[in-house]
Amino acid sequence: IQRIGVYTSGGDAPGMNAAIRAVVRTALYNNIKVTGIYRGYEGMIEGDFKEMVSRSVSSILQKGGTILKSARCPEFRTPEGRKKAYDNVKEAGIDALVAIGGDGTFTGADIFSKEYDIPVMCIPGTIDNDLYGSDYTLGFDTANNTVIDAIDKIKDTAASHNRLFFVEVMGRDSGCIALNAGVAGGAEAILLPEKDTAIDELIDMLETAKDQNKTSMIVIVAEGDKNGGAYHVAQRVNEKFDYFDTKVSILGHLQRGGSPSSFDRVLATRMGYFAVNELLKGNRSATVGIRGSKIISTTLEEALRGKEFKLDEELVTISQVMNI
Ligand code: ATP
């Protein structure tokens, strides 16, 4: 391998910059050149490339977002789009890729790598933590810390006014942030896209909490909950349960930004280092992940077509037990 191309794609996540830095520096350490590909597959198709030297990644470790920018690129789904991308990649002398993103990014990388026989390592960067092959994805820990910071603040005001707060957090298909932040923030109930909790069931939980003389309550609603979002849930709960003043807070995009936590920085650095070393060892198609405390690789075949990512059922039970 003479030159690695690195890019970020799909939704941005804190820790992506730390991963870019680790890829660049590990490659340079091994006398391999690095090209930064801007805006993911869009930049690959347009040839938006930049030579990366060690100083190109100075002082980015602590920054959220991605210095290489990100994009969604429908054209890369077509063979014609990928051909344009390959011509640019070849012309730039790139003979291996490191992709940082979510499952869409991995799927694109998988197809491209097979079509043009180019090795690729994928690093999981998404706050949703919903990728098979890694216990944690980059950005998840930071997003959780942001959410519990908000919950703690909301709890202060909820307790002062005897309020019932519905806090909507990110997670269209994955309830990981809602579940973790709900447990860490001591929520009275958590609505998850995977669970389909009925409104009457939720009201029963709130009645139980009320009977325990709670003076305020927090319900975490994942944005993909089947009941249709925090406002809708609040309205329907209010029709039958009106002991408390009800408020809704939608945390939105602030959950995606911010300086990565220590955990995400170290994880990103380990994953970037590992990805480059796997390419050097001849690994041609895999995702990087953490299992327990070990960094591992999973073939793209298994990661994309193997088992589905599953929510931690034990943590769901624990969240319920904590509300006794
Ligand atoms: P997140 O889930 O965090 O938003 P993601 O990587 O899953 O991240 P997507 O928008 O699904 O985000 O995918 C990113 C890009 O990957 C797409 O815009 C597209 O360019 C490429 N891609 C996704 N699926 C395919 C596919 N089937 N074939 C080719 N390219 C694809």
Image (cartoon, rainbow, N blue to C red):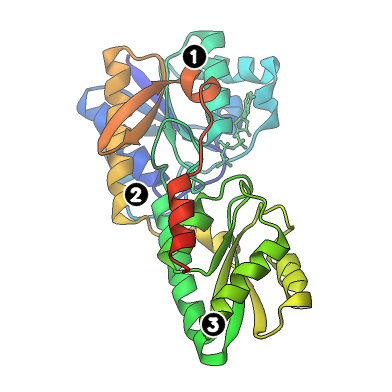
Classed neighbour count for the residue bearing mark 3: other residues with Cα under 10 Å, few (<14), some (14–19), many (≥20)? many
Q: Label 3 sits on what residue type? A: Ser
Place of residue 324 in the rendered image (x, y in percent of width and height, measured from the top left): 46, 69
Ligand 1 resides in the quarter of the picture at top right
The image's mark for residue 90 is 1
Give neighbour class at mark 1: few <14, some 14-19, many 20+ (Cα, 10 Å): few
The residue beneath circle 2 is 264
Discs 2/3, front: 3
Q: Is residue 32 visible?
A: yes
Does 123 appear above or below 215? above
- The disc label shown at residue 216, or none: 3
Who is closer to the viewer here, 60 or 53?
60
Q: Amino acid at mark 1?
A: Lys
Location of the N terminus by quadrant is: top left
Q: Nearer the viewer, residue 131 or 42?
A: 131
Q: Tag 3, which secondary structure?
A: loop
Q: Is residue 63 left or right of residue 167?
A: left
